[in-house]
Image: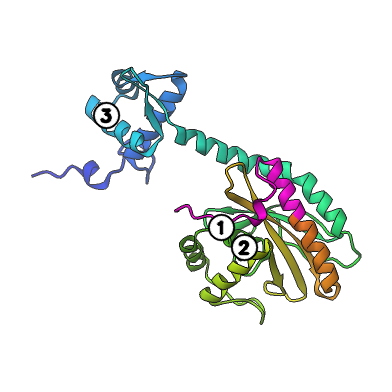
Amino acid sequence: MPVDTKAVSGRSVRGEPGSVQSVERAMKLLELLAQSGGASSLTDLATRSQLNISTCHHLLATLLKSGYVAKVPGRRTYALGARVLHLGQAFRRQVDLPQRAQPVLDRLNAATGEAVHLAVLQGDQVVTVAKSEGRQAVRVETGEIGVAEAPHATATGKAMLAWLPEEKTRRILAINGMARFTPGTITEVDALIEEMRHVRRNGYSLDREEFQLGVVCVGAAVRDHTGAVIGSISASAPAFRASEDHIIRMREAVTAGARDLSVELGGRESAATDPPETTST
């Protein structure tokens, strides 16, 4: 019996090498629905996508189950689902966040005189997306924008990990590893999970020379209008300048900045001290 190689591999013969045919077809249906500006029938979508009715129906059923497509009430037509809006908002948030955060970072920079960072969780990596350099004569060396940081050893990373479901935190740590950068780096998962409890209780995170010798950082989480943690901000100072009084000033400025940015994004002023999120991954 001849083997249908397309059925076995699930890959498109006509598409780009390595592309998955069913995914290409599903994306095409979403694009057609977007182009329609409203709703389209099964027959119309099948015709425009050059798919047979059965294949088109199965793909729409899958997209419907995932929330990317919705049935129009009272009509036998399909439209884009709410999940597409969620993706669009996430993309816009990612693009807009650094620009919207910059005034807050500048105020934090002026209040502390120290280097300030904004980081986000992109997939399973903590990535710096904006920064303001320190104003002091002696400043810490800061990472470049777009560079992934160690989530377990940085104030920005710990500020975000603390509010994730524990299973997601453990997964991120497993993927990124827990390399030792300095004698103070926490390299045991359970020890870091315990520290996350302190971060949630206090509303801020600390990096006491855990990522870089001679550098102390304070971080706090930033939330959006849904209450979800979407990033974190931090201030970094040379260890010789990081007296307890200065750390307190940094902590107050960072938590206030995180609160202001959260409010700017539609969050609540109490977000920094809210109970940890329990939504599943």
Reply yes or no: does residue 278 show up in magenta: yes
Closest to the camera, between mark 3 and mark 1, is: 1
Is label 1 in contact with label 2 (beta carbons under 8 Å)?
yes
Seen from this angle, which residue lies furthest left? 1
Can residue 117 be seen by looking at this rendering? yes
- Up the image or down, 146 lies above or below 180; here it is above
Question: Label 2: which residue?
Answer: 200
**Dot 1: within a 10 Å radius of its alpha carbon, few (fewer than 14), some, or many (20 or more) residues?**
some
Left or right, 255 with reference to 59: right
Identify the magenta region: 256-281
The tally of labels here is 3
Mark 1 lies on a secondary structure that is loop
Left or right, 188 with reference to 114: left
The quadrant holding residue 148 is: bottom right
Quadrant location of the N terminus in the rendered image = top left
Left or right, 241 with reference to 182: right
Closest to the camera, between mark 3 and mark 2, is: 2
The amino acid type of the residue labelled 3 equals: His
Question: Label 3: which residue?
Answer: 57
Reply yes or no: does residue 122 show up in magenta: no
Seen from this angle, which residue lies furthest right? 137
The amino acid type of the residue labelled 1 equals: Pro
Can residue 242 be seen by looking at this rendering? no
Question: Label 1: which residue?
Answer: 276
Report the residue at 57% width, 40% height from top. 91
Say whether disc 3 or disc 2 marks the residue closer to the N-terminus: 3
Report the residue at 74% width, 76% height from top. 213
Q: Position of residue 204 (x, y in %)?
A: 69, 62
Mark 2 lies on a secondary structure that is helix
The amino acid type of the residue labelled 2 equals: Arg
Q: Position of residue 134 (x, y in %)?
A: 84, 60
Q: Position of residue 232 (x, y in %)?
A: 67, 55
